[in-house]
Image: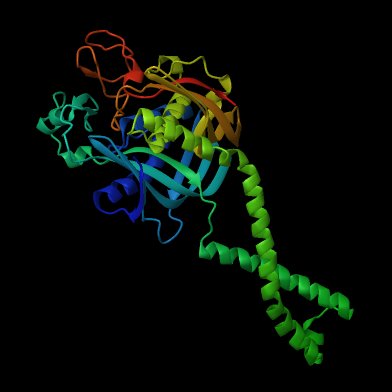
Amino acid sequence: MGIFNIQEITGTFKKKLLDFKASLGEAVRYGKEIPFADKDINYSLKLQNERLKEKGIDLESRIYDRDKDANKFLAGRKWKDSHYESTMCYSWCGIKRVVKKDGKWRYTDDKKSVIYETVTDVVSGEHPDNDPVNCPNCGMVSTIAGLQDGCSYCGTRFQMDDLFPKVSSFYFLDDVGMSKKEFWQGYWVFYFIAVATLYALCCVLRGEIFLPHNLIQHRSNLIGVLIGIPLGSFPIGYILYAYFLIIRMIVKAILSAGKMGTAGSRRAFESRMKKISPEFSYEYFTSKAISLIKTAIYSKNPQDLLFYTGRELDPRMKDIIDLNYGGALGCKSFKDEGNMVKVVTKAYFDVLYAKGDRIYSKSQVFTATFQRRTDLPVNLNFSMTRIMCPSCGASFDATKNKNCPFCENPYEITTDDWALVDLQYK
């Protein structure tokens, strides 16, 4: 069950959150693995990097500090199962993207953002010694207990602190808020507009332009122009700025009308799912949905993926080079039969396309359909890179094998997690 309790993150959690934020740009640009990130994240970033290489594109994504609280992470919702607890953490930042192709500049943008990172840690209770996990050193699948005794492939021994906590999901949202500094920067623009407007109005009414020589000759002009206009412009500038902010808010509300309509469907879906699976968390489902959509889109052949069972993707998705969650995942329909649930979602993303030499950004809505068994509990540490075969008990990387390489039996992803059964443009 989600718990809402905002507090500042400190200690090991904070270090890994900051390190992840600092490492993300190079992971996308150069394909570098982030050791303390979930393997599913690294797999998706690796696929994105391969997409960029195929298109001959250099994408520099720089996450920078925006204010004095840039190194502060706050904790939002938490959810847990019998072994693990996940915490949604967020921090304010800026993101500047520069895209080059064949060494030539093609696109750039700079956005105020909030980065959301989910950190998963082991909680008290039954210890998950036999849960499969990837070795941070060699990447081979082992168990938590096995890695503490020494990886059977590379021999490296790990403490629990090396394995957990880890970053298990992330996304960015545009920051529509305004800091005090930004507020006053905007106000002063409108203040000087008011000054210029009042000055022009006074010139029209007096039939002369107030220049230095006639200001000095006529003290009344001097007092009116140098004192009256600046003082009178304060309230006028504030009124103009207030109208601007109201119009800005209305425009944003109109543009986000579709997203706002997803709030009710989210509550209804979560309420129904909790009756089936009490440990269900919409935050976990959203993070999982984002990960599956991104991995399917970046993949060369989604049909080879264990978790994707849908038709061939729209060819336009092959032109996507950067994909960021747009802040809303609505539930269009929900159906549960027996021990299986299927949900059709409307997923909002901000998408960066590369078609030939043209690079452009577009707000995009996808229809994504997910399916999962409901008679088995959710495992918050589940990853397709470390699956335990239900037939023989062996662990393997399902990004490389759809069948268990030891007993050759097929693995059904809905046994442990959500499967993406269809993805298309709205």
As displayed, is residue 120 above or below residue 311? below
Q: Quadrant of residue 194?
A: bottom right
Q: Residue at x 81, y 91 (%)?
A: 217
For the C terminus, give its image quadrant.
Answer: top right
Q: Residue at x 37, y 43 (%)?
A: 117
As displayed, is residue 212 above or below residue 59? below
As displayed, is residue 154 above or below residue 160? above
Q: Residue at x 57, y 31 (%)?
A: 365
Looking at the image, which residue sits at the far left? 149
Q: Front-most of 232 and 280?
A: 280
Residue 113 image point, x, y percent: 49, 49
Residue 312 image point, x, y percent: 52, 15
Looking at the image, which residue sits at the far front? 275
Question: Is residue 306 among what the camera can see?
Answer: yes
Horizontal placement of 265 versus 138: left or right?
Answer: right
As displayed, is residue 130 above or below residue 91? above
Q: How many marks?
A: 0
Q: Quadrant of residue 402?
A: top left
Residue 372 image point, x, y percent: 39, 22
Horizontal placement of 72 versus 394: left or right?
Answer: right
Q: How is the image coloured?
A: rainbow
Question: Is residue 324 among what the camera can see?
Answer: no
Looking at the image, which residue sits at the far right? 207
For the N terminus, give its image quadrant.
Answer: top left
Horizontal placement of 214 versus 167: left or right?
Answer: right
Residue 161 image point, x, y percent: 19, 42
Q: Residue at x 79, y 90 (%)?
A: 220
